[in-house]
Amino acid sequence: MSNSSSVTHFLLLAFADTRELQLLHFWLFLAIYLAALLANVLIFTAIACDHRLHTPMYFFLLNLALLDMASISTTVPKAMDDTIWDTRAISYTGCAAQLFFFLFFISSEYSLLTTMSYDRYVAICKPLHYGTLLGSRACVHMAAAAWGTGFLNALLHTASTFSPPVCHGNAVDQFFCELPQILKLSCSDSYLSEVGLIVVSACVAFGCFIFVVLSYVQIFRAVLRIPSEQGRHKAFSMCLPHLAVVSLFVSTAVFAHLKPPSISSPLLDVMVAIVYTLVPPTLNPLIYSMRNQELKDALRTLMAGFVSAARDC
């Protein structure tokens, strides 16, 4: 039986044994990663450069794009590096850092999505008080609270996860340092504190989910009372992208961590992890830009500027 001080590295799960499949996984990951980065960079740049989009909703969307870029960059580059060089090792410190930053960005994103539901609630249900309740200072404070909550959650979980001794080897059954997989390697009698912390975090996450649900109950009640069809359409266009992003984020995360043991398998665990680490950061920009005419116009202006600059060069 060894303790954590004797474990210098962990072995991540390999995607394939043959070189052809390894290269296929590399190119697929690279394509998805570049697509996610490009889409989120365009969203971020369009919002930052267009003064018409300097509103609370787009300020939170800018933060969401930052978190999406950061979260996907925590896991995918390492997975691509392991695939192309046919290696599985990650240092003990590197594993702890990867777990910390992944939890940090994911937790912050969930907190931010909860904050964005409040933004939509105020915009639809209390439009006359929107400027007062969501001024620039209030928006900065709420965004900072989302990032700070994610940081604190990640710090507590990482410290609690890597404090117990490791008794079950160093092979991680996942392509990145995922919290449940690291816990499986800990001594069975030493990670009770982390289990308790997970329960507390789950309760807080469930509370945020209830807050989002109640916000949208009020939002839909207010929208259905709007007399004009055009007004209802505009209100739904403001809210449905956020609701779709929340649904995508929550459904993938819940299935990943709460799926029944009877259907659990190493292959399914990897596939689900790929879905909840790659799909939300890639699709979020598309979801927000499809039904948002202001954002579409800003992106067209931005792309036209890029084309014009390229022609001048």
Image: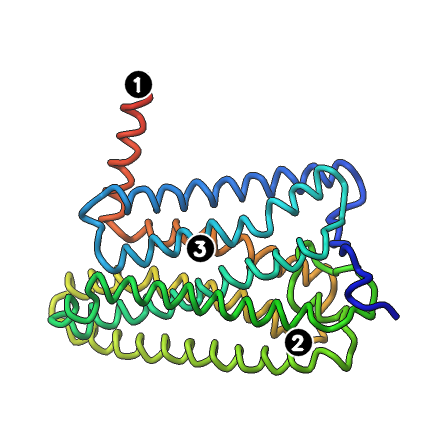
Q: Which residue is mark 3?
A: 67
**Does the residue at mark 3 contact the one at mark 1 (Cβ under 8 Å)?**
no
Q: Which residue occupies the extreme right position in the image? A: 1
Element under disc 2: loop
**For mark 1, does the 10 Å Cα neighbourhood hold few (<14), some (14 to 19), or many (20 or more) residues?**
few
Q: Is residue 168 left or right of residue 238?
A: right
- Who's the residue at 41% across and 61% down the image? 245
Q: Position of residue 24 (x, y in %)?
A: 68, 39
Is residue 130 positioned above or below 73 on the image?
below
Q: Which residue is mark 1?
A: 311
Question: The C terminus lies in which quarter of the figure?
Answer: top left
First in residue order: circle 3 vs circle 2: 3
Quadrant hosting residue 223? bottom left
In the image, what residue type sits under mark 2? Pro
Quadrant hosting residue 13? bottom right
CA–CA distance between discs 3 and 1? 33 Å
Q: Nearer the viewer, mark 3 or mark 1?
A: 3
Quadrant hosting residue 182? bottom right
**Does the residue at mark 3 contact the one at mark 2 (Cβ under 8 Å)?**
no
In the image, what residue type sits under mark 3? Leu
Q: Which residue is mark 2?
A: 260
CA–CA distance between discs 1 and 2? 56 Å
Element under disc 1: helix
**For mark 3, does the 10 Å Cα neighbourhood hold few (<14), some (14 to 19), or many (20 or more) residues?**
many
Q: Coloured how?
A: rainbow
Q: Position of residue 43 (x, y in %)?
A: 34, 46
- Who's the residue at 67% across and 42% down the image? 25
Q: Position of residue 299 (x, y in %)?
A: 29, 40
